[in-house]
Amino acid sequence: MEWMYTLSGFVVGFIVGLSGVGGGALMTPLLVLVFGVAPVTAVGTDLMYAAITKATGVWVHGRRGNVEWKVVGRLALGSIPVALLVLWGMSAISTESEQFSRLITFALGFALILTAGALIFREPLQQAGRGISVALSQAGGRGLIYSTVVSGAFLGALVTVSSVGAGALGVMVLFMLYPRLPTIKLVGSDIAHAVPLTALAGLGYLYLGAVDFSLLGSLLLGSLPGIYLGSHAAGWVPERALRTVLASLLLLIGGKLVFQFV
């Protein structure tokens, strides 16, 4: 089974390198639906996986000056306390209970649907973001700060429960709040915020006994070369077509996970 995990890690890593879509949106549902990994273990392991794989990205973007640390700090001001609060609430529920599994599964499906929406409606959302940015600027600097902190809190809760949201959703939030910043700085800032958030959440799941290190090692063994190769092949596939296919896939999976509870 380990070689299957490694192969899956390679495929997901390649797609992440190719498209930039966060690994959690692909890896976690793959572990749950294909390999039958318990949802809580899939989320906990993927959070640790995300923290490790994105750490190198922070180092690279930071050295190139592609991280707006003030923006990262505002996001973290909302996300870190909320992540701690969510982990505290989760610790009161048995990780082996049906209630816990249903919560994780529903949150995962909801996050996948949001991610699909962010991919499908990226251009309209960016246009809407320009209007939001102007309105916040007219309201004064505090409006933008408060909105960033609140957005960070939302991302912190979503990422902690589902491991999804630190990629495409995080970038879309920054696009809407800071449309004047270059895309590369928005991406770099999102990655810089994702590392401490996923690391903290991952450690919380480790405390709950929901991280499989054997699985983590197998995924990393495949995904790291996959990300490297995918990033070099990024120009070979039409970006819009790839985004449409991924969004459709995430929408189908997310709908399946959510509507099984309806």
Image (cartoon, rainbow, N blue to C red):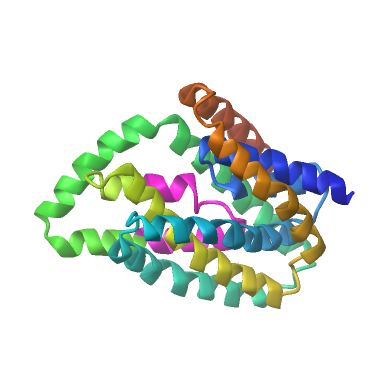
Residue 219 left/right relative to 134: right
Which residue sits at x=39%, y=61%?
152
| Direction from residue 187 to residue 237 in the image, left or right | right
Q: Is residue 181 above or below residue 157?
A: above
Residue stretch rendered in magenta on the structure = 151-173
Task: State whether residue 102 is above or below residue 196.
Answer: above
Q: Residue at x 39, y 44 (%)?
A: 172
Residue 239 is situated, as x and y percent measured from the top left of the image, at 48, 26
Q: Quick check: 38 above or below 261?
A: below
- Between 94 and 192, the residue placed more toward the observer is 192
Q: Position of residue 27 (x, y in %)?
A: 68, 47
Q: Position of residue 211 (x, y in %)?
A: 74, 67
Please tell me in which quadrant of the rendered image residue 256 appears: top right
Q: Is residue 150 visible?
A: yes
Q: Is residue 137 left or right of residue 85?
A: left
State the residue at coordinates (11%, 60%).
140
Tell me the quarter of the image containing the C terminus.
Answer: top right
Res 41 quadrant in image: bottom right
Q: Main secondary structure of the magenta part?
A: helix
Q: x and y percent of residue 244 in the render?
A: 52, 25
**Viewer-nearest residue: 254 or 122:** 122
User: Residue 36 versus residue 218: which sits nearer the camera?
Assistant: 218
Asked if one can make out residue 262 in the rendered structure from this viewpoint, the answer is no
In magenta stretch: residue 100: no
Residue 155 is inside the magenta segment? yes
Considering depth in this image, is 233 or 242 the residue closer to the camera?
233
